[in-house]
Structure formats: C-alpha cells, structure tokens
Amino acid sequence: MNHLLLSICVVLSMAGIDAWPSFLGSGAEPRSAENLPLKWTPSEHIAWQQEIRGHGQSSPVTWGNRVFVTSVEGPKKDTFYTTCFDVELGTQLWQQPLTNSFPVTNSYYVSRAAPTPVVDQDRVISFYESGDCVAYDHEGNQLWVRSLGKDEGPLTAEFGLGASPCQTADDIIILLEHDGPSCLLALNKETGETRWKVDRDPRRSWSSPAVMEVEGTTQIVVSSGGTIDGFEAETGEQLWTFDDVGGNTATTPIDFGQGRFLVGASPGRNGEDAGSAAGSNGLIQVTRNGDQWEVQRKWVAEKATPSWASPILHNGLAYWVNRAGVVYCFDAETGESLYTKRIEQSCWATPVAAGDRIYFFGTGGTVTVLSAGREFKVLAENETWTDESLPKEQPLAEEKSEERRRGVAMFSRPTLYGVAVASDAFLIRVGNALICVR
C-alpha cells in the first residue's frame, strides 16, 4: 500500500472511534443496518432536533460523540458559524462565528454555507464559499484561519461555490472553481499554509474532489466542468486527464477500487448539457503503462442523469437517482441495467448504503429505504418532519427578476441537504435544523 494512503487509513480509521469525517462519509467504515432505524415518523424515533443559527446547505460530519455543522447568517451573508453538538443528546457544545471576508447578498440563488467541513482526531476545518477557511480543535478553540478569497481571488461566481474539500492525513484539498482564474490547492491541516497549488481554467462547477488509490499512487480525482483529472496527492502534479465528458458539474467521483470510479453528469439547470451528459454517466478505468497513464470509459449508465446526488456503489451494484426521483441500478462490473424505478421524491443528498438497505433522502424529508440487491423492493417510506415541526426561517430579500421570483417557491422550502451516519443514527441536515433519527 502506498505510504501516503497508509497514513490516511491510520488517521481516518475508526480505531474504536465512530466517525463520518468528510463529505459523503469519505474515510468512514462501511455501515451495518443492524442498529440503524428502518421506519420512523416525525413523532417516533426522532431522538432530538436542534435549531441551527442561520442557514446552511452543507452536510454534517462527526467524530466520536460530536457532530459539526456550518451555516451563514445576515443580509449580506455577514457571519459564518461552525457549531458542535453532542450526538447522543443533541446538546450544543459550542458555536464559533467567523466574519465573511467577501459579503454578498444573501439569496436563495447563491450557495449558503454549502461546502461540507472535514474533521480528524485533532481538528475540524470549515471552508466557506467566500474562500474563508478556519480550523478549530474539538473544544472550539481556533487554531488558524485563511482568506483564500484574498489570497487566490476574488472568487466570482453567480451562484456561489459549492465544492466540499477532501482530506489526506496531512492536508485539506480545496477546489476553487469559478468565473475567474481557478485552482486546486492543498493546505497543511496543522498550520493552514499552502503546500501546493495547481492552476485551472475558469469553469462553473460545484463538484467535489475525492481521494483515491490508483495504481499504487494516492491521487486527488476531480470530475468537473468537461474534464476528469488525476493529481498526485503529495505534490499536486497532474498525472492524467480525460475530456470525453460533459455535464459533470455537481457530483463527486465514487471509488470502486483498482483504479475504477463512477462519474455522475447532469443535463444542467436548463438542459444545456443534455447531449454530453447522456453518455458521461458510468464507470471510468485508470491504468498505468510504464510512465504513461491510460483512461477509458468502461460502460455508460444509460439514461441515468442525476442532479446533485452522486452515484453510489454497494455490494457490486451502482445506483443513480435523478431529479424526478427515478432510481437506476446497474451491475457495477458489467454495466448491465438491472432496473429503473421511481421513488417518492427527488434527492439532492447522496444515498447511503448500509448492510442490506439503501436509503434515499428525498428533498422534502421523505426517506425511501430500498432493499440492496438486483431487484427493486421498497422496505419503507419515512416522513422526517412536518411543516409545523421545523423552526421557521427568516425570509430573504425579494428577488428582482421574474425568473428568480418563480424559483423562490422551490428554493425557500425546507430541504434535506445532507446526512451523516452514526453507529445507530442518521443525522439529517435541513437548512436551519439538525435532526437525529435513532
């Protein structure tokens, strides 16, 4: 095993500590369904619910008995917050504010604390769409802070930034992609200093990078805005690129091992990438022949076009879900289509696999549980909240354009943005609330 990957495994291994340390649970151990709830209602199996100051679109992360979330508040997105709760009781343990270095109008159409933080045994690091990045220890003491908007910006993005960072044992990897000069960079987790930086062309993308082992090297894989690229994690050297792809602007590449990974691609907000996205979902294989890297598409996930939810892999099967709530299941080795079926709601959050179950977290709070396998079987459909059970949000300023005013009806509703999984519970993130289902 590559020495850097080994150190990652040591740092992110559970070693008796349950953790969901980064976006999509990267670094977490596989979850068993044995202790997780199968069925619940807003009045049953909700262990606790806590209001979160402001609003956030990020997912929770956990380490031991602590869960961390981020949010933003104020008419100009004036203040960012990192908040820590006790997983068992829901008690707020601490909350730390951070002044936004680049205030902008707080709008339904601009990302609001969208990037998910990372956590390890020593610290939690929160990154925000302004470029502000801050590290705290587990007691809430600030360790360091950086304004990447000042150092690498200004960051010009009509809809804001959304890419969540990933982490190695020593570094946090941040993708800054926007309408101006963009980059991928590694910050030392202990000091916040830049260890390496790779310039990238301007592009509009909200997809998050992923750490993978590919042919004995630890790589940062970025699927974003018309290319898929692999970078050496220690130095940032670009090793390979693949440009026969389009619409890959929102989802994270999902590791299948042996240099293989799933890629998701969307038609886009107005269908602008419909043509290229149709053939871009599927399995990519990266191999090395001497000093040369070869990249090829092994199979295409026919008709599978997600919106924000990344595909997932479980027990040799690959799953996609689109904005209409249609679930696509494929044999991950061969690409054989096994079923295409519709569930109750669209999903923005990426599904979670646990044992013999796949949990699909609908935007409106309905969680559909499917049997993990080659046949479509619904095990449960669960409502997580009612309009009355959630805290009320402060309305934002009225949008100026008619198009945006029409869209407010969708973006202003309570939305299930993300989830973390504890040993016996789901920690479900709504914009201004965290709900524990146990």
Image: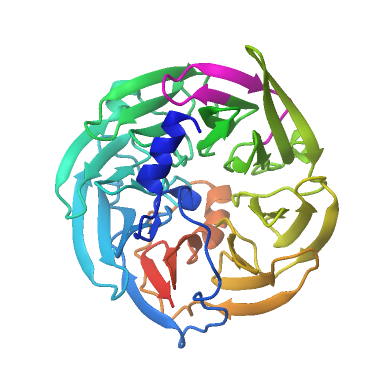
Whether residue 166 can be seen here: no
Q: Residue furthest front?
A: 1
Q: Quadrant of the C terminus?
A: bottom left
Left or right relative to 294: residue 347: left
Q: Residue at (36%, 64%) from the top-left corner?
A: 432
User: Which residue ends up furthest to the top in the rendered image?
Assistant: 291
- Residue depicted at 35% across the width and 75% down the height: 49
Position in image of residue 203 (x %, y %)? 55, 26
Task: Decide: is 196 above or below 301.
Answer: above
Q: Residue at x 29, y 43 (%)?
A: 125
Q: Is residue 115 visible?
A: yes
Q: Position of residue 88 (x, y in %)?
A: 31, 74
Q: Position of residue 115 (x, y in %)?
A: 41, 45
Looking at the image, residue 111 lies above or below residue 55: above
Q: Verify whether residue 245 appears in magenta.
A: yes
**Quarter of the figure with residue 324:** bottom right
Residue 180 among those drawn in magenta: no
**Looking at the image, what colour scheme do you see?**
rainbow
Q: Quadrant of residue 224 in the image?
A: top right
Specify the segment rendered in magenta.
230-247
